[in-house]
Image (cartoon, coloured by chain):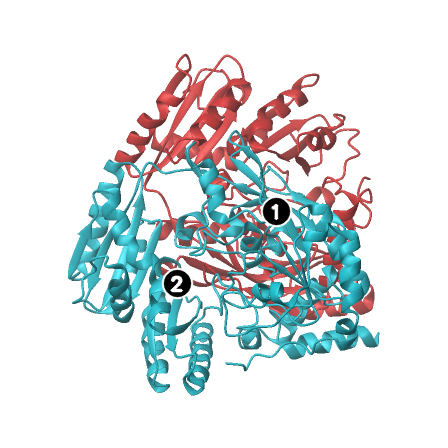
Chain colours: A cyan, B red
Amino acid sequence: MHNIEFLEPDARVIAQRESIVSRLREALPADCVIDDPRELTPFETDAFTAYKRLPLAVVLPETTAQVAKALKLCHQMGVPVVPRGAGTSLAGGAIPQEDAVVIGVSKMIRILDVDYANRTATVEAGVTNLAISDAVSADGFFYAPDPSSQLACTIGGNIGMNSGGAHCLKYGVTTNNLLGAKLVLLDGTIIELGGKALDAPGLDLLGLLCGSEGQLGMITEATVRLIAKPEGARPVLFGFDDPEVAGACVSDIIASGIIPVAIEFMDKPAIDICEAFAKAGYPMDVQALLIVEVEGSDAEMDDMLKSIIRIAKKHNVKSVRESQTATEAAQIWKGRKSAFGATGRIADYICMDGTVPLGQLSYVLRETYKIIDSYGLQVANVFHAGDGNMHPLILYDVNDPDKAEKAEAAGMDILKLCVDAGGCLTGEHGVGIEKRDLMLHQFNETDLSQQMAVRAAFDPGHLLNPSKVFPLEMTARAIETKSAA
Amino acid sequence: MSGEILTPKTEEEAAAIVASSITAGRRLRLSGTGTKSSGFAGESSALSSLGLTGILSYNPAELVITARAGTPMTEINAALNEHNQMLAFEPGNWGVALGAPGTQTIGGIAATNQSGSRRFVSGAARDSLLGVRFVNGKGEIIKNGGRVMKNVTGLDLVKLLAGSWGTLGFLTEVSFKVLPRPVMEKTLAVQFSDDTAGTQLLASAMATSADVTGAAHLPAKAVKVLAEAKLDEKPTSLLRFEGFEASIDERIKRVKPYLSTQSGLSVIAHEHSRRLWADMNDLALFSGTADRHLWKLSLPPSKGIETALALSENSETNWFADWQGGLVWVECAPEQSGVQSLAAQSGAHATLMRKGSGTGGQSAMFQPLPPAAAALSEAVRSSLDPHNVFLSPMNFASSNALAA
């Protein structure tokens, strides 16, 4: 799988490697700058492991001021910069390039302020998603977005990719839970955006930053919203004979006026894979599973679940498993939560992330199987059915170049299908390098040129994460125009 | 008082108007009905969305509504009501309070990020806005976002356009997420002898699992206007609970132990509760007092009530706080100075929503940004409107330009 190209590395920059490293060393504490090729290897890719590029150097600053110094130097020397959180991007958002300096936030891990009166936490960008919830859990609060990688991924990376998770049906994604940020621009300017108030003055630059994939600047601190934990949470597991009927059941639950905190869908291949790995006790004689989770007091949850089960029964649900205890609840989630890991154990896979309107779920699922069949591949589907965010896992063998190429091609076909069904290329993983060249399927050139013009307001020289998000030839053209001017 | 009003019937017509304005050197003030910018209109030509109307698609099962920008909110709300759905950020009708009665448009709601009481738990208009189509300052038609709830495909210009007050582009079409409307609501009213007690009370309630969806504070004077004589004229904090009746009653029971016991507690039933919050969202407290300034302050919630009290210390004000204190509306004499600087001290900002017709009052609508943020905002503005065609009340290049 080497079809995705990067910008041609700038020979002029690579030739200056020595002096770039020594200037970074002069400006920053010695142990913040890495240039030994062996030590650079861990930074050569992210969770989109099919592609690897060794960066020119890696900088791991400890403070905002150091980030500003590093960015300013790179800007002055015309060196591309690839910002990095924990490197858990599934779209290649943190994969570097040979002429780039990686600036990582892994040493910026302090929780700076927890303010329950205003329900906010202010943390450095390298703090992990889960660490925020852990820090406030004993006091009855949590931070809502919960991407699968929440144990490892950083809040800085979450902002860069506008990460979601299983529970965003009720609580929203990163952009809906971010109140303030400290942003370092490429020229080293430090800007405070927002704060503890709900609305920031002026243009919504905070909203623009969420999901900007490291192309506008680097976030060094974030102020996020804390939410009081619900009294309890309880999932119910449904097994259906027909995936489409499961889809119809989802629509009816939502139409009934109940908004569960999560509605997760798994198809037969996903059930088989997850059950073999996690032994969660999932029914094996069904074609689709739904996990529906509600929150509240015991009485409230009883009430909601009763209504939800009534709806499922109308759709001839084949098996219903309720959970009365935390252990039983964890058991229901166990299989779903291990889906990516379990799949990775039996095969290599690429995980798609298109989102479709809820009414199109059944159709898109049906067409997905057709596409996969036409390539002679296998697919396991797990996804957030409540918000239409699909995650087909296309299985292949990394040592079989033919299969690998087919998997990539099938993935692209599925994403086009999502767009054509009224949806989008990516719901929560980001564009990165993976979906970059499909952007023209969802947008026209005028749409993308406008986005690139906004990007250029922050980084006219296209130095920040330059090979990502926009079709490579559009970026290359913009760089050419810029240098010709 | 204002110049010509252009009302294109199609997106293409709107694009052509913008393109021709560039060559003619004509600047355009973008508007819907014009309820929120009447005091700032000036002599310029207006490009209005009033000719672009109609709901384009609404499938209740998909929880999304798409409409042309000039569609009246009355039409949107009627369509949603029919299916027991709502815009979760519950935008009210500000027309009367802002001195420009008329039906607001869905595009105007998006362009000003207008949000009501549920905003502090369910997000603002910008959080429900899924997609837009707009004409940029080059006369190009741009789409961004879409009709799905999770979407990180490319730069999020949707958020940028939301709340940009006609600075960046002329919205032609918007898609909003919608949610089921709660079947019932009740409000727990907590009365004190002193307004300052409200800050702690609201914070305590929000620290519980009771799922409060409205947290406001009314000083005695506001209680008199809004409470339909059902409450004593005393400082009152209001906690709203929504959902199924059994759940509401259970949550009210659950939250009570966390509230100060000496306080007077009473429960406001569904019908009255609905009217009460609707009146707050319509700014009913301020109707018919157009000679005074009306400020909207966005603050850290714990600073809301104390800031309102500080502004009331030496002058007569009319105010209430919402969003657990994170939003304060204050009506005061135009001569009252220092509202924006007082707000800035609390990590907040103040927007002059209605310019009083009385004497004095040399205030810009928006609080000036710090220089670096202003420069960045100007660069972003210019990337959407390089020829400076759009005339907006936001001004980053010179923050004092609108002072007169």
Q: Which mark is residue A108?
A: 1
Q: Nearer the viewer, residue B96 or A173?
A: A173
Residue at 21% across, 47% down = A323
Q: From the top left corner, tell me how far across and down residue B276 is, in percent.
A: 44, 31
Q: From the top left corner, tell me how far across and down residue A235 is, in percent.
A: 27, 49
**Helix, strand or loop at mark 1:** loop
Q: How many marks?
A: 2
Q: Which mark is residue A388?
A: 2
Residue B242 seen:
yes
| Mark 1 or 2, nearer chain start | 1
Q: From the top left corner, tell me how far across and down residue B143 is, in percent.
A: 58, 67
Three-letter residue code for mark 1 = Met
Q: What chain does mark 1 sit on?
A: A
Q: Which mark is residue B75?
A: none
Q: Nearer the viewer, residue A80 or B53?
A: A80
Q: What chain does mark 2 sit on?
A: A
Q: From the top left corner, tell me how far across and down residue A346 is, in percent.
A: 33, 72
Residue at 58% across, 67% down = A41
